[in-house]
């Protein structure tokens, strides 16, 4: 059987074979990816997509902050945008950011440029690409509020462009086709004062630090807040604060965060999350929806990914 690498087009970026995904996720867990592709730029990615056989599965990863890769790893190619594709520019109060740029870097760039309304990005642990895909948000704002248009490619390497309405952005969700890979976004800010913006960002950082676990391996918010409520309150009410399975634990500080205490496997973390969901539901609470994206295969089961 021909190896995946032999079926891939020549690129200007780099291919890495059998790379542990534990090196690329905040949780620090996950089996190997068959191939990781780091495109140099948008043209390199488009060329790759045009030449990559359709039978090879593709997955796009940014910072790996809101991602759980299962212990059996990922069959196919992981496209990692955060290595090279993270340029940020602006014209007037509009910022254009490549999707490998982190939300925090865009917030800091905007602050220095005197562009307001993007301060909330400092509180989102991820990249612009992930923010577009899940309509990420914090502190009363979300991506659909600031996105003018997103650009990228479809599975065949054809260019695509879409507004938030085109993508059907709703709370922590987007209906953008799974095969679309976003490469940049135009973000609308407002004229502001750098000093005032900096103060607001410091306030957000302080608030986040006071409320959320720090200095540990976590994946950000685990579950989407249910309509009219808070996921952490439902988890706390179900008696799950501090609950442990293997090396994974529900945070004592903020129980919508799962923690790798240093020895967790991806299975420990996913089992803990599913146990929390079941306990909340059994106690009369809502059916919590995962906010963390789960991909790859377990050690003993076939590949199964979040929709």
Image (spheres, grey):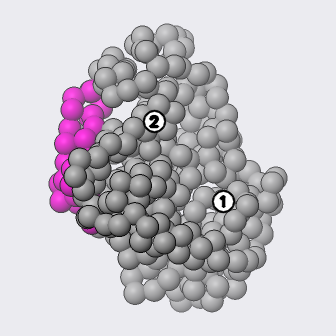
Q: How many marks?
A: 2
Return the residue at label 1. 218
Q: Quadrant of the N terminus?
A: top right
Marks 1/2: CA distance?
21 Å
Identity of the residue drawn at 32% across and 42% down: 89
State the mark number for residue 182. none
Tag 1–tag 2 contact (CB < 8 Å): no
User: Which of the pair 189/127 is nearer the observer?
Assistant: 189
Q: Is residue 77 visible?
A: no
Q: Is residue 144 magenta?
A: yes
Identity of the residue drawn at 49% across and 38% down: 82
Q: Is residue 297 magenta?
A: no
User: Which of the pair 236/130 is nearer the observer?
Assistant: 130
Q: Is residue 218 visible?
A: yes
Return the residue at label 2. 81
Identity of the residue drawn at 40% across and 63% down: 194
Specify which label sits upstream in the sequence, 1 or 2: 2
Return the x and y of residue 128 as percentages of the image width and height.
Answer: 40, 50
Identity of the residue drawn at 54% across and 70% down: 202
Which residues are drawn in magenta?
A: 142-168
Q: Is residue 181 above or below residue 214?
A: above
Q: Residues within 10 Å of mark 1 (few under 14, many from 20)?
A: many
The local secondary structure at tag 2 comes to loop
């Amino acid at each position: 059987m021909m190896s995946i690498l032999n079926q891939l087009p020549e690129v200007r970026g780099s291919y890495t074979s059998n790379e542990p995904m534990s090196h690329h996720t905040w949780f620090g867990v996950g089996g190997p990816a068959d191939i990781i592709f780091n495109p140099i730029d948008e043209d390199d990615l488009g060329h790759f997509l045009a030449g990559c056989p359709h039978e090879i599965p593709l997955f796009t990863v940014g910072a790996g902050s809101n991602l759980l890769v299962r212990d059996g790893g990922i069959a196919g190619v992981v496209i990692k945008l955060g290595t090279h594709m993270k340029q940020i520019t602006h014209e007037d109060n509009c910022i254009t950011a490549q999707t490998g740029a982190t939300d925090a870097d865009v917030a800091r760039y905007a602050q220095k440029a005197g562009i307001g309304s993007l301060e909330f990005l400092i509180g989102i642990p991820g990249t612009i690409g992930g923010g577009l895909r899940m309509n990420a948000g914090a502190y009363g704002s979300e991506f659909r509020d600031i996105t003018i248009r997103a650009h990228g490619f479809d599975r065949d390497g054809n260019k695509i462009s879409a507004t938030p309405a085109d993508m059907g952005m709703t709370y922590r969700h987007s209906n953008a086709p799974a095969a679309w890979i976003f490469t940049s976004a135009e973000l609308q800010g407002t004229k502001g004062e750098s000093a005032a913006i900096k103060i607001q960002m410091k306030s957000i950082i302080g608030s986040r630090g006071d409320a959320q676990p720090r200095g540990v391996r976590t994946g950000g918010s685990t579950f989407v807040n249910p309509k009219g409520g808070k996921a952490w309150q439902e988890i706390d009410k179900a008696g799950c604060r501090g609950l442990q399975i293997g090396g994974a634990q529900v945070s004592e500080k903020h129980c919508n965060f799962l923690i790798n205490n240093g020895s967790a496997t991806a299975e420990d973390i996913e089992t803990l999350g599913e146990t929390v969901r079941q306990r909340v539901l059994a106690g009369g609470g809502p059916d919590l929806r995962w906010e963390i994206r789960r991909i790859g295969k377990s050690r003993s089961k076939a590949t199964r990914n979040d929709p």
